[in-house]
Image: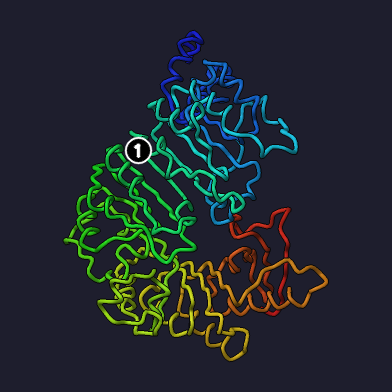
Amino acid sequence: MSRIVELPPELLDQIACFIDAREDIISFALACNYFFTTLSQTHLQYRDIRGPLCLVPLWKRLAEDVRSASLVRSLTILPEDSWDLQSVVRDSLPLDFRLPTEYREYDPGPDSRRYDSVPVNAALKLMVNLRRFRWFRVPPPVCEEGNDLWRTLGGLGTVRDLHVLDLHDLDLPDWPTVVSSPSFLSLSGLSSLDLRTDALDYSHDEPDLTPLLRMLVNNCPNLVSLRIHLQLFSHDETASAHVLVQDGQWSNLARLYLEGLNCQPSDLSSFLCRHPTLEELRLPCMMPGYRWAQLALPPGNLQNLLAPRLGTLHDIDLNDTVCLSDYFHWDFEWEEEHDINTEDLVQSPWKRQLLQGISSHPTITSVGLANVSHPSQLLELAGVAPQLTQLSLDLDISIDPQSERQEQDWLRALSHFHHLEHIIWYGYLQMGDYGERYRCFQDEQGTKIRRLLEVCPTLREIGDPWRKAVVIHRAGGVLTWVKRHQKDSGDPVIRKTDEVYTVFNV
């Protein structure tokens, strides 16, 4: 170590310049005090920046300071207020600020939303080592002559990882979209693209994502990860993935997530056979839609897919009869060919196959059942997956598990899960904060928790989708539990912030 600390700071700085990931820089800096002192005010401050457009002083600094700008490897433009985003979007994004020390207390004032992307674009031109760019602000940037953010990124030639929200304010229907921007569609060399867009939802024409898909096929041969979430709330149709599944050929593709697209089963089969490197795969309901039974893959295909080690299976149902239109979007050609009213109830065409699939995957320990309509469905699930440790139930709104007779039937069915440790039961448990004024509701919670523990004594966490009861101690007829958020730890230890409850005669 004594020889290492003799390295001149200039040489240490040059070594650090070859390290892209912030986590690796942190590990490098923590090797010794000398490293940390040398790198803490430069590489650790600027390697990964996350901030809003309104931080104009920072962007001006980076637009003038070649040295600091060259240290940036990842840049994320955040919303001024995270509540500008829908919760389903917000909850999946890293929205915490990450700024150099001198800018962490900066207050842009009440007009923070009025800033445009001009200062950021000027700073980007000097970020010659940028590897990742993320835009999480609504609306997307306006790209004009002389201030085209996408053209700047393309000109750098270093960006490999792109994550963009192309979402729009309803009050600004004519705001330019990312997926129609010529400069965005000319980007190349990406290894990862994550795009969520509602741009096609504002068009009266049939959704068409062909220009974007063509860009990926022609300009991004080294694609490893592709996520496209196409929001189509006002359209019955989905966009064609024809270009992607017919012409896509990515030898390193490992992760594929698509939403809002459609294709034919034969094209999808060929695409999957051409991509044996896939490890994670999520396809939308219309890939291939009503023709799902025609999808065929050779034995042993997709060997790298994580499915053989599948541990979690959520948002499934075990209904005997189904309404096909609840599962698929409109497909005029298929309906014409089959002369079937997709609004009618029909025998589930996939339930038997689904149960067989669950049975063949003993690695599955967590299942989420949607639209559960009868306790017999729990018995069927317990018959093929007795190993479950986590279960989430979303009951059909017509079911009333509060009635004593129905409650006993449900509890009796749950008793067949002998290893259950965590249950979320929406429709039976509501773990809200009622306070002393509504003590009766708290007592009711305790009673239901006690009944669940009687039939599933291995339970440690019991709750609704937002909150849970964590069992701390259960002995001698006394049950002690605490209330926490679902995301919080399930450790059976009372913390200072816990609400502690006790139920007797357990």
Q: In this view, does 211 lie to the left or right of 116?
A: left
Is residue 288 positioned above or below 319 on the image? above
Q: In which quarter of the image is residue 188?
A: top left
Residue 224, given in percent of the width and then of the height, sits at 32, 42
Residue 73, given in percent of the width and then of the height, sits at 47, 28
Label 1: few (<14), some (14–19) or many (≥20) C-alpha neighbours in 10 Å? some
Nearest the camera: 401 or 259?
Answer: 259
Q: In this view, does 436 lie to the left or right of 166?
A: right
Image point (46%, 75%), residue name: 418
Residue 334, given in percent of the width and then of the height, sits at 28, 73
Image point (65%, 57%), residue name: 493
Image point (20%, 54%), residue name: 273
The C terminus lies in quadrant: bottom right
- Extreme residue toward the left, this view: 298
- Extreme residue toward the right, this view: 437
Nearest the camera: 93 or 411?
Answer: 93
The residue that label 1 is drawn on is: 191
Nearest the camera: 238 or 286?
Answer: 238
Mark 1 residue element = loop
Image point (49%, 20%), residue name: 126
Nearest the camera: 451 or 39?
Answer: 39
Is residue 93 positioned above or below 458 on the image? above
Q: In this view, does 220 lie to the left or right of 396?
A: left
Residue 155, given in percent of the width and then of the height, sits at 40, 26
